[in-house]
Amino acid sequence: MGQTEGGSDRRIGRRSLIVGGVAAAGVGTAGVLAWDGLSRLWWRLPGVEKSRVEGAVDYSGARWVAASPANWRRADRPDDYAVDRVVVHVTQGSLDSAVRVFQDPEHGAASHYIVGQDGHVTQMIRELDVAFHAGNREYNERSVGIEHAGFVDRPQDFTDAMYAASARLTAGICRRYGIPVDREHVIGHVEVPGTDHTDPGPHWDWDRYMRLVRRARTAPAPTSAAASASG
């Protein structure tokens, strides 16, 4: 399951950017260019409040259930942090129990998605934002976390529907961010440096999963009309 990232947020004060921009603006054309660059930089900083559509999802067909704000950090990925990893987790419990835990502000961790054994996908954190799921700050900032409902010692929990739905989800993430579909970039929680977690465990069929992800990745992307219909 998701793991808290630890550490304090990296932030640059809006006031320092404004002051810097005003100072630069006092030196003619170069100042105007500097101010323009600073203005764009401001909107690319982690933690900046941006307009969001309530209940919007990044994966067509997912249901939205918001995680506690204590379990993630607002960002504007991939502008402020490049996204180049997908981290596969197992919840060590049911989908409903994972949702409850990720809504608990005392838990301190949550993943972007949970895939159920029936193949339904729940999104709890926008891909724009940094979820506290990997137990490693750098990996949190650069990855999307996907939980799978079940237990690592129960191979029967990893159903055909779960594998297929998760593969489509991961393929879409890889397509959006240009992530290579290989085991260097699609990894298990156990492979995150510094973690003490073992998921997805020995019963997760990586060969099967990666084959399904590659197949879904090379399939034509759904049209906007199809996406709307499936949503």
Image (spheres, rainbow, N blue to C red):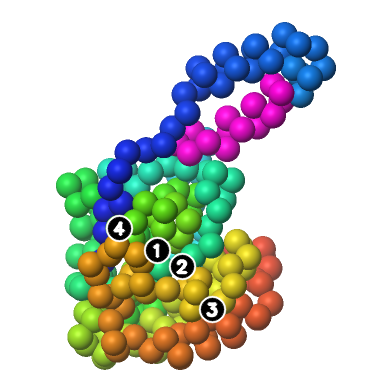
Q: Nearer the viewer, mark 4 or mark 2?
A: 4
Verify whether residue 37 appears in magenta: yes
CA neighbours of label 1 inside 10 A, class few (<14), some (14 to 19), many (20+): many
Q: Of callouts 3 and 4, which one flags the residue occurring earlier in the amino acid sequence?
A: 4
| Distance in Å between CA atoms under marks 4 and 1 | 11 Å
Q: Amino acid at mark 3?
A: Asp
Q: Secondary structure at mark 3?
A: loop
Residue 7 in the image: x percent, y percent? Answer: 30, 43
Q: Amino acid at mark 4?
A: Gly
Q: What residue is disc 1 on?
A: 145
Q: State left or right for residue 12 relative to residue 157.
A: right
Residue at the (20%, 65%) spot, across then down? 97
Q: Of callouts 1 and 2, which one flags the residue occurring earlier in the amino acid sequence?
A: 2
Q: Nearer the viewer, mark 1 or mark 3?
A: 3
Residue 86: assigned label: 2
Q: What residue is disc 3 on?
A: 182
Residue 16 in the image: x percent, y percent? Answer: 52, 19
**Can residue 21 be seen in the rendering of this structure?**
yes
Q: What residue is disc 4 on?
A: 135
| Distance in Å between CA atoms under marks 4 and 2 | 14 Å
Q: Which residues are magenta?
A: 34-48
Q: Of callouts 4 and 2, which one flags the residue occurring earlier in the amino acid sequence?
A: 2
Tell me if label 1 and label 2 are in contact, CB under 8 Å: yes
Depicted 165 relative to depicted 145: above or below: below
- The quarter of the picture where residue 180 lies is bottom right
